[in-house]
Amino acid sequence: MKKVLVFIVLLVQLLQLEAQSPFSFDFHGFVNPHYYADSRSVVGGREDMMLFYPKPILKDSLGNDLNDGWQANMLAITARLGLKITGPEMLGAKTSAYIEGDFTGSTNATINDLRLRHAYITLDWGHHKLLAGQYWYAMVIHEIMPMTNPLNMGAPFHCYARQPQVRYEYHHDAIEAVAVAQWQLDNMSQGVLNGTPTSSTQFARHSLIPELNAQLRFRTDNLFFGVAANLKTIQPMVQTTYAAVQSSTDLYSSFSWSLFGKATLGPVTVKAQTLLNNSLYEGCSLGGYLMLADSTFQDWHFNTVWIDVERNEGHWRPGLFMGFAKNLDYGNTDFVHCFGRGHDMKYLWRIQPRLTYTTGNGLSFTGEAEYTRAGYSDPVGNLRLSLSMTYAF
């Protein structure tokens, strides 16, 4: 609570100084409590508010499935505060900065704590733009992000994460080119640290190579589409303390790509994407890599496709998200460690209708039904029902 009060006091002081400063300040945010109920236990984050997929069957001595059965919760941790600072022209560029936080915490253990979402500086020369700081993970194409409820925003079919980065954009008429070098903080790679499989930033840091991303886009008033390629390099085995275990400085690189698009067709917006996921665990997506008995590494991939359709005007705004992912290496068990998400599933699919009522003055209500089916050896499904209320300012 002390951190929150300090943050609010600082914002108030900045707004009071605005009239005497060459900088202008735009303070905004929202409060949005969510209620959600699941028909079985799920793999997820932040009290399972961010749902990935249902857990497999787990039977007790009497044959009962311990993961079956309804459970419900209500949270308001996604309440958000943001501040945009616009400054004078410097180095021939328009300058601005943005900082934003919410209360989801950086891990499940720190839920309800104030967490940094975005913090970046932009220099805009018109055709050229430079961004440095914490921003959307490069494989998150925020222009096409599904507006699902309450938190997963299409994950794990669509990536959802933020990373420290340097991002360069070039714009010429309808053509855009993007290049990103990014590092890790909240969303970390998996590997073997001091002989123990875990998640850590150490695997990316010891590689010395940032995660690299390149995109080519086309944009008009009603159409947006493009292609993205992503290269991640880590050192999967890191030794920081002495121990009688095998160590290796070998690097592992994984390549992923995406095709994406959005079209505004009058009152309807259609968004779609296909992904070849090769170890996009850090982006809250599917896929990963295998460590073999000889301490070498092997890819395993998911192919993902999704579509989101939504009415973009009026008080009543229905929407529908549908996603499907196929494990291209399902059945491979010749490994010592498996790192990533979804290796034991042959497929994953989701259908997710929603209905939002918006007053047009910052207040809205959303109801949603989300059914996710996971193709384990014994397939299971989860039905999530959720209700949310948002007050934006």
Image (cartoon, rainbow, N blue to C red):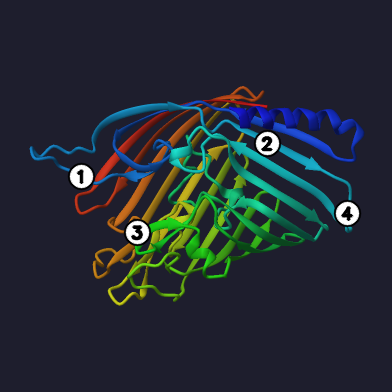
Task: Give the label, 2 or 3, closer to the camera.
Answer: 2
From the image, tell me which residue sits under label 3. 326
Do callouts 3 and 4 mark residues in contact (Cβ within 8 Å)?
Answer: no
Do callouts 2 and 1 mark residues in contact (Cβ within 8 Å)?
Answer: no
Q: Secondary structure at mark 1?
A: loop
| Alpha carbon distance from label 3 to label 4 | 49 Å
Label placed on residue 90:
4
Q: Position of residue 205 (x, y in %)?
A: 54, 64
Label placed on residue 57:
1
Q: Residue furthest front?
A: 242
Q: Residue at x 50, y 52 (%)?
A: 187
Q: Is residue 316 above or below residue 349?
A: above
Q: Position of residue 87 (x, y in %)?
A: 85, 45
Q: Secondary structure at mark 2?
A: strand
Q: Position of residue 122 (x, y in %)?
A: 76, 52
| Alpha carbon distance from label 1 to label 3 | 20 Å
From the image, tell me which residue sits under label 2. 82
Going from the N terminus, do you reach mark 2 or mark 4 first? Answer: 2
User: Which of the two residues, 49 or 1, is positioned nearer the viewer here?
Assistant: 1
374 left or right of 200 in image: left
Q: Secondary structure at mark 4?
A: loop
Q: Residue at x 39, y 63 (%)?
A: 194
The quarter of the rendered structure image containing the C terminus is top right
